[in-house]
Image (cartoon, rainbow, N blue to C red):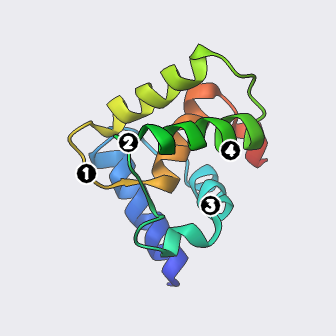
Amino acid sequence: MGKRDELIAKYAEDLKTKCNVTPDLALLTKVTIGCGPSIYDNDAQTVAASDKDELERIRTNFLMKKLGLPDGPALMAGIEAAVETYGKSERNKYRAVFYYLLVKHFGKEAAYA
C-alpha cells in the first residue's frame, strides 16, 4: 500500500469516527488526489479552522474556483457546517476530509467525475 492509499484510509477513518459519515471511497480518493502534494506536507495537510484567512482561501480557491460555486453567504455557511461536522474541538482537520465534506454539502460530486 502506497503513502497516498494509507492517507486515504486514514481520511476514511476520520470520516467514520469523527464526522459520523460513511465515506464514498471513490469520491474521497478523487478529492485526495485533487489536493495534490499538500497532503504530504505536515502544515498544509490540515485546515486551520480558527484562521479566518485560511477559511477565506478555501471559499475563494476551492468553493468558487474548483467547484464553480457563486459567491454568497451560503459558502461560509457551508464551511461552518463542515467545521461543525468535523468537530470544533478536533485540532487536526485533514484538508482532504474537509474538502470532501464541502463537496458533499454542496452536492458538487460532478466536479470530480
**Callouts 1 and 2 close, C-beta under 8 Å:** no
Crowding around mark 4 (Cα neighbors within 10 Å: few <14, some 14 to 19, many 20+) is few
Q: Which mark is residue 81?
A: none
Mark 2 or mark 4, which is nearer the start of the sequence? Answer: 2
Crowding around mark 2 (Cα neighbors within 10 Å: few <14, some 14 to 19, many 20+) is some
- The secondary structure type at the circle numbered 4 is helix
Q: Which residue is found at the position 60% from the left and 60% from the top?
A: 29
Could you say where residue 23 lies in the image, as x and y percent from the top left?
48, 46
Residue carrying label 2: 49
Mark 3 or mark 2, which is nearer the start of the sequence? Answer: 3
Q: Which residue is found at the position 42% from the left and 26% from the top?
A: 81
Residue nearer the viewer, 112 or 95: 95
Q: Which residue is found at the position 43% from the left and 42% from the top?
A: 22
Q: Which mark is residue 91?
A: 1
Mark 3 or mark 4, which is nearer the start of the sequence? Answer: 3
Crowding around mark 3 (Cα neighbors within 10 Å: few <14, some 14 to 19, many 20+) is some
**Callouts 4 and 1 close, C-beta under 8 Å:** no
Could you say where residue 90 lies in the image, as x and y percent from the top left?
24, 46
Amino acid at circle 1 = Arg
75 w.r.t. 46: above or below: above
